[in-house]
Image (cartoon, grey):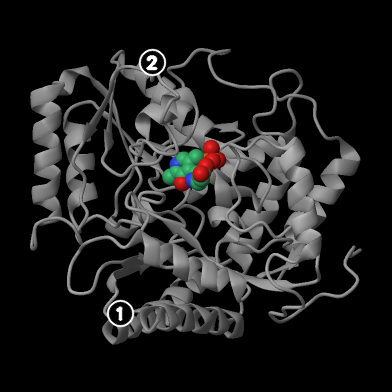
Amino acid sequence: MTLQQDTPTARRLRTEIPGPASRALQDRREQAVAAGVGSVLPVYVTSASGGLLTDADGNTLIDLGSGIAVTNVGHSAPAVVDRVRKQACWFTHTCFMVTPYEGYVEVCEALAELTPGDHEKRSVLFNSGAEAVENAVKIARVATGRQAVVVFDHAYHGRTNLTMALTAKSVPYKHGFGPFAPEVYRVRGSYPFRDAPGLTGEAAARTAIDQIEKQIGADSVAAVVIEPIQGEGGFIEPAPGFLPALSRWCAENGVVFVADEVQTGFCRTGDWFASEHEGVVPDLIATAKGIAGGLPLAAVTGRAELVDAVPPGGLGGTYGGNPIACAAALGSIETMRNENLAASARRIGEVVLPRLRALAAETGVLGDVRGRGAMLAAEFVEPGTREPDPGLTARVARACHAAGVVVLTCGTYGNVVRLLPPLSLSSELLHEGLSVLEHAVRAEVNR
Ligand code: PLZ
């Protein structure tokens, strides 16, 4: 069954963006929806497939954002749709904490198999990335009997009270929302484009470790929580050696190494998980987003002895591991496996990076082009400097939107355009989206 009348296969603009139907919906929204929830591009979507979003005005846009790294398998992958439909017919909810069901167990089995390391693992399921990260901290605290949590400059971990404390950037995530949870300590990370030239990953880790040892004391630290590639903070890939050095230090000091793979997970970076790139085996790994093809699901997976340190009743939630979300996860994982989407992610990187590098050389405003797999970014600066140019970044993003290409921005300085296409995006649409981006940059630079 398909609910769509026609399935578009190309970008197609019928009105200005957003068009009249979307603008009318936006007016309605403003009378009903909280102002605190923003939308990057207020075109109101009526259907989506094949990396294309169709809006209320009949415009079709290329999606290079995947709803912030969620629809890795596409917006309506057949295996996801099929399993969701069946599960919805069977039952929508019982609450795993009341009367359990197989789908939850199957997702946890898959997570044990797919996440790095061949140790015994346990998983617990939640609804959002923030909830997963927050529960990873709960587990680490119970398992170690310690309280301090170490996070990094430019980190993003969510919007709940504890994860706001873990998140670095004040506006818009934290400003006015305090007081924040105590026992959270922020240290230097590794940001190759902005660190001293030549600073190695090991040296950057040494700085972070010094801060931890001097300012907190290793034996007070429950967990080090880190995104293997920082997402909202700017798609910052640490220098090689940084993550392994930190993870080694954690192991030597009884500190739980928590990888927040909410954005990097599920084939996004060309591996199942970004930690694998340098052979890092996290003690706990938080996942969400790409796990379930668009349905809300999240997980903490980790060493059995750590996770099982929390007694029954200590972890959970009404909806955590909802059966429809679990069905979607199984469909999504099946799709990633069958279609080898990790390889697709790598191919996307191989197409995008050279084109962005050429654009950097041509225009001088892309100070850094970086990324792994299909998690790609360009950092906009004033030519010849490392001075961030958030104004240019916003104008380029707006020009892409107006031309029917959804790109997202990120970064502590608001100066990074990031590309997170669905991993199933066709090479034609990917190239077309990139051409629109290139055109937008050239037009802005030559204005
Ligand atoms: N950890 C690494 O990227 C979510 C949030 C955007 P939730 N990132 C997108 C916004 O403005 O809210 C994210 C992440 C990393 C945790 C989270 C939080 O995941 O599912 O949004 O709670």
What residue occupies the far front of the structure in this picture? Answer: 447
Residue 184 location, quadrant: top left
Q: Residue at x 9, y 57 (%)?
A: 196
* Dot 2 amino acid type: Val
Vertical side of 128 occupied by 361: above or below = below
Judged left or right of residue 271, residue 144 is left
Position of residue 219 relative to residue 155, above or below, is above
Q: Is residue 238 left or right of residue 303?
A: left
Q: Is residue 396 left or right of residue 39?
A: left
Expressed as whole percent of the image width and height from the top left, the position of residue 235 reads 36, 57
| Image quarter hosting the C terminus | bottom left
Task: Locate residue 198, reporting x and y percent.
Answer: 8, 62
Residue drawn at the location 69% of the way across and 22% of the way down = 318
Name the residue nearer the viewer: 360 or 27: 27
The residue indicated by pointer 1 is: 360
Q: Are marks 1 and 2 in contact (CB under 8 Å)?
A: no
Residue 340 x, y percent position in the rendering: 55, 69
Please, what secondary structure does the residue beneath circle 1 have?
helix
Q: Quadrant of residue 108?
A: top right
Q: Residues within 10 Å of mark 1 (few under 14, many from 20)?
A: many
Mark 1 vs 2, N-terminal side: 2
The residue positioned 76% from the left and 41% from the top of the image is 324
Identify the residue under disc 2.
142
Front in this rendered view, residue 144 or 205: 205
Q: Quadrant of the N terminus?
A: bottom right
